[in-house]
Amino acid sequence: MTARLASAIAIVTSAAALGSVAAAQPPRITNGAVHMQAAGSPFIQSFRTLVSAQSDVAWIGYFVPAARGGHPGCPCCIEPEGGMTVRSSSAGRIELEGPSRLVLLYRVVDRQVERIRAYPEGCELDAGGRPVRWLDRVRPADSIALLESFVGADGDRRSRTTSGALAAIAMHADPSAAATVERLARHHATAPVRAEAIFWLGQMAGRKAAGVITEAIEKDPDTEVKKRAVFALSQLPTGEGVPLLIKVARENANPVVRRQAMFWLGQSKDPRAIDFFAEILR
């Protein structure tokens, strides 16, 4: 091997090594020791083993691809009891495209996940003096399966893990995300979870979600779920939900649901809604 060839190979090998290190880097995390490790397999089992090994409050995090438009902002907020401060690291810049990756964070207390948060990768994270276990190369489908396991069987929509898990699933850029949220919207045993899943399905899928949403209005046995589904129709983009709301207001057998549809039609200020109200007032 010539000296020139050996030198070229060394340069390529070094560049490849640097590339792999860069790909593994966590987001900007300050005020907390970051411990990096590979995501284990099977992922859910290895994640739960890692959670049970935390003797004090800690964070566990990883990246997943973010759905277009499906990510929160970076408000400066502090969680109670020594939580994580989040700041935007893009001050002074206008980002025409959203971040391509989502930061998922799990707060572990007493060897259990008690909170799930999601942030764009551009956020600067202050860990509040807590250790951060950063997992490398988590597959999106594995992440979604893990998050679904935190959707509470008790149906308590106020649960931090249930609400955080549903929101995080909806922000994944993976085909299994919409399928998972749709399954929860249709089949979860508890009404609050079905209602929240319907909301996120509307945020994710737009027109594609209309069938599931209207099915919930017609067939779900719980009135609160029906009301949440009516709201989800009002959130469909570019006024796509207005004709469906008018149909609900005209035809649904539940008077509470009809009133809800009329309320959101009134909020829409859509000309079709105005024509509908003029018609019923004649």
Image: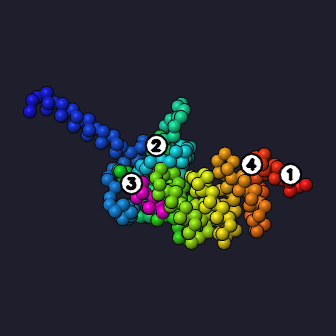
Give amino acid for label 4: Ser
The residue under label 3 is 139
Q: CA distance from mark 2 to mark 1?
A: 46 Å
Q: Image height check: is 116 above or below 225?
A: above
**Split into 4 quadrants, where in the image is the N terminus?**
top left
Give amino acid for label 1: Ala
Looking at the image, the residue that sits furthest to the right is 282
The residue under label 1 is 278
Residue at 18%, 30% (x, y): give it: 8
Q: Is residue 243 left or right of residue 195?
A: right
Q: Main secondary structure of the magenta part?
A: helix
Q: Which residues are magenta?
A: 140-148
Residue at 49%, 37% (x, y): give it: 89
Tell me the element at label 3. loop
Residue 9 position, x and y percent, is 18, 34
Q: Are marks 4 and 3 in contact (CB under 8 Å)?
A: no
Residue 100, which numbered label? 2
Tell me the element at label 2. loop
Residue 96 position, x and y percent, is 53, 34
